[in-house]
Image (tube, rainbow, N blue to C red):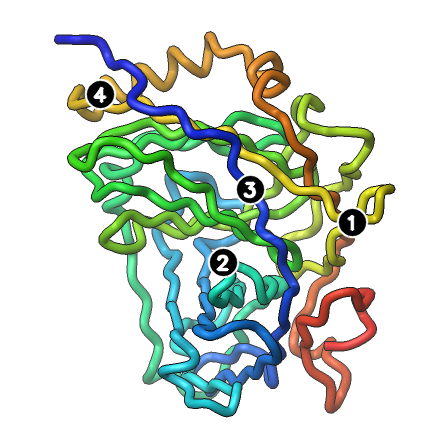
Amino acid sequence: MAPLTPLALAALLPLLVPAWGWSFTLENYPTQCTALTWSWSGGTAPHSFSLIALSGINASFSSWTTGTVAEIAADQACGTDDTCSIEFQWPAGTPVVIVGSDAEGFGTGGTSDVYTVQPSSVDSCVSSTTNSSYYATVPAWSDPPAQCMQMLSGFHGIAWPPEIKVIIPGGESSVVESPQIQDNTTAALLFWNMTVPAGTNVAYVVEDANGPLFVSSLRTVGAGSSACIQGGAYSSTAAPAAGALSTSPPATSSSGHSSTGAIAGGVVGGVAGLVLLVALTMFIMRRYNRRKMLARRQTIGLVAYAATRPERLERGTWPEGERYKDNPGRPSGDEF
């Protein structure tokens, strides 16, 4: 059997797209079998919203079986008055995040904090599923994540290309772009860099050309290398408590311009199958000099994130008559 050889190596790609070009507002707290209403202002049509139910809090890779995502094409599904309302069909206790996107890209409208679905007296609408098929289609995944870590994502029997959406509650979510390789590729290893500081909470929505493969739990980025940290742009913070989070928009660099992040993506593919993929994964991760590779590939700056602090946003904490507002540049706690 011929050894696996690299099929393609992606150039440095932007990890984080500019967010908060427009904003959206939640009119009420997510509640089981109750209409969730939100409105938005600005942006370029078509607007879309990703309603993401996470596979719990701090659950490991093997337990990401309960997460789902609902994609709402707002301009078509909700009319022209920039307001949308849908029945929230996830059960009470589910952690959820909402991401706004438009024609400019994924996450350009911002990402909400994590909210826990509240109970109600009605449960007839509740829909819950269990997904274990990703065990076969995604046999390898670097978990837990660490600062400046080179992430490895193994795919088998998928419809190329895979798409990894990195969700940062209260921050700037992004998409890891896959390099262009042979159209008939179904098995590959994708390498990309976790250019996110320790203490940040992240989740993943992973898809192929046919749709979602899995939605992860909320994971906290651990301590790691400082190779991708430039000029103190990142501030490491203690891991926030499980549950809802409070974050601030990214700070700007000393030059007055927001930094940009980068990933270095590459794939190794072939028809060797699941076992060989996993074996190769273990070999590469033992041998690979992460620090040298990151230093060699990193050519552009990184987004600076403001420090996050623990804050549970349960229903009872919302002041009477106020609501969550995804409003850039406004310090956390000024307005919901």
Real-space Cα distance between discs 4 and 3?
A: 30 Å
Mark 2 against mark 1, which lies toward the viewer? 2
First in sequence, mark 4 or 2: give its number.
2
**Horizontal and vertical percent position of residue 147:** 64, 31
Using the numbered discs, state the Cα–Cα distance from disc 4 to disc 2 in whole angstroms.
34 Å
Q: Amino acid at mark 4?
A: Val
Whole-angstrom CA distance, mark 1 to mark 3, is 17 Å
Q: Gap between marks 1 and 4, in whole Å?
A: 42 Å
**Residue visible at 65% across and 77% down?**
315
Q: Secondary structure at mark 2?
A: strand
Point out the tag, 1 or 4, that comes first from the N-terminus: 4
Q: Which residue is mark 3?
A: 15
Q: Amino acid at mark 3?
A: Leu
Name the mark on residue 275: 4
Q: Which residue is found at the position 74% from the left and 43% from the top?
A: 304
Residue assigned mark 2:
106
Marks 4/3 in contact by CB < 8 Å: the verdict is no
Judged from this view, the residue extending furthest toward the right is 254
Q: Secondary structure at mark 1?
A: loop
Q: Is residue 93 left or right of residue 20?
A: left
Quadrant containing the C terminus is bottom right
Q: Which residue is mark 1?
A: 306
Q: Secondary structure at mark 3?
A: loop
Q: Mark 2 near mark 3, Cβ–Cβ under 8 Å? A: no
Write the residue at 53% across / 33% down: 263
User: Which of the pair 35/98 is nearer the observer?
Assistant: 98
Q: Which numbered mark, 4 or 2, is in the foreground of this view?
A: 2
Q: Quadrant of the N terminus?
A: top left
Residue type for callout 2: Phe
Q: Against 114, is 298 above or below?
A: above
